[in-house]
Image (tube, rainbow, N blue to C red):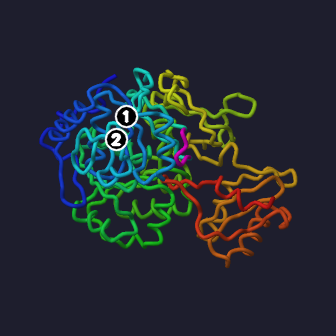
Amino acid sequence: MGMIWNLENHAGKTALLDEFGNTMSYDLLNTESCILAARIGRRCLVFSLCRNQIGSVLGYTAFINNGIVPVMVNSHLDASLLDNLLQTYQPAFLWVPKDQQVQFPHMSVEYEAYDYVLLKSGYNKEYPLFDELGLLITTSGSTGSPKLVRQSYLNVADNAGSIAQYLELDDTERPITTLPMNYVYGLSIINSHFLVGATLLLTDKGLMQKEFWKFFREAEATSFGGVPYTYEMLDKLRFYRMKLPSLKTMTQAGGKITPELHEKFATYAQERGRKFVVMYGAAEATSRMGYLPPEKAVEKKGSMGIPIPGGAFHLVGADGVEITEPMTTGELVYEGKNVTLGYAECGEDLSRGDERHGLLETGDMAQFDADGYYYIVGRKKRFLKIYGNRVNLDEIDRLVKGKFNIEAVSGGVDDYMYIFVTDNIYCEPVRDFVAAKTKLNPAAFKVVVINAIPKNDAGKVLYKELTKYYAE
């Protein structure tokens, strides 16, 4: 167990700057972290209700660097879902935004700093914690599910180091927050930039808000990260015309971006001497497993790249044998020190040790080309059998998005596919297009119009929410 960052190494540098002009130096962050940790006084479990604010980052830093184990939760999580999580894990303390203190009337305030309060929970049970357990994070596919990913200190430190290496980060970087910090991708940006003494620009504003871009320009942001949905929004915002002289790097993860959009942003970056870096990751691997070197972004569009420094990929066929031939589909297995300990589904699981031993079966089906670049072709379980033909649903979604430039999500049951869109003018064209592409009877396809595609914090589609539209 140990500190992830040596904050004193960056003395005199600015660690945090928020949209209201408040700043915190690395020295002050270190001092305030120690004060907060001392108020807790021991290794225990804390629920941290996250926002992109100074108080939230201070709490995270204090916990990680002082052996206190945080459960990272979005501050906007539904109250009943949060209560269920609290009952399941019985944390000793909560670190919450001051304006949410009223949600916990039976808890006592132990400390207050930077618009956050430390609450003593009053739960009478304290679950033993595995020595190497560093933090707990919800799986990207869940909303309030009790299933948490158990990350060790080594996992976090190793992954942050790999990311800093392949992105060539240094203390001149000024990343702006575009992702929640309870989501591994958002958290990895904090972890990797704190290693090098960079300045984190904090805002809870979204890309669709003018205030976000005003802060971006004034604070001279050098980079931002986004999920595929982020880039779809930027494309609609005519991002390519924006004057952003400080921007150096754009990163993308959290799902596969369409090859068309990949090419647009890669070409934009190439023409302006910027970097567009497509990455591949999962909460179960702390954050990142693969990246596409920016100089290959145009040439290898559609690829998620090569393993991160210190990691390795293996492709395993249905027969369990490792694949060595290019352009052959198998399940992607990742190997590295950032592979997490395993899951927790209840308080008793917090004492469990390393159950994965550095190997992660990703559940993604992939291929590699002759140059060793990897391409995700779908999920192991995201397919239907239609009239005996195996149809990959992710592939259908990509084809429809690429053809019509709309958001579309498919699902269904064997022999009957549902394709969800948000505009009824696409009903017939989408159905006819998919039937033509798959060369299957159009009777197997139904296009359903819904108001919005249901998603979680990470921008991932909540497929379970769509099952209610399936005919009984």
Q: Nearer the viewer, residue 70 or 232?
A: 70
Whether residue 173 is visible, yes or no, is no
Image-based side of 424 in relation to 264, left or right:
right
Mark 2, residue position: 107
* Occupied quadrant, residue 419: bottom right
Q: Quadrant of the N terminus?
A: top left
Per the image, label 2 sits on a secondary structure element best described as loop
| Crowding near the residue tagged with mark 1, few <14, some 14–19, many ≥20 C-alpha atoms within 10 Å | few
Image-based side of 247 in relation to 302, left or right:
left
Q: Nearer the viewer, residue 227 or 467?
A: 467
Q: Main secondary structure of the magenta part?
A: loop
Image-based side of 445 in relation to 80, left or right:
right
Residue found at x 51% / y 48%:
81
Check residue 122 in the rendering and tell me which mark sits there, or answer none: 1
Q: Which span of residues is magenta-colored?
A: 142-146
Whether residue 7 is visible, yes or no, is yes
* Occupied quadrant, residue 467: bottom right
Residue 418: % across, % down: 74, 62
| Crowding near the residue tagged with mark 2, few <14, some 14–19, many ≥20 C-alpha atoms within 10 Å | some
Check residue 296 in the rendering and tell me which mark sits there, or answer none: none
Q: Residue furthest front?
A: 106
Residue found at x 65% / y 37%:
331
Q: Decide which of tag 2 and tag 1 comes sooner along the chain.
A: 2
Q: Are marks 2 and 1 in contact (CB under 8 Å)?
A: yes
Q: Quadrant of the C terminus?
A: bottom right
Residue found at x 18% / y 34%:
9
Residue found at x 32% / y 27%:
67
Per the image, label 1 sits on a secondary structure element best described as loop
Residue 432: % across, % down: 77, 71
Mark 2 and mark 1: span between their CA atoms? 7 Å
Q: Residue furthest left?
A: 12
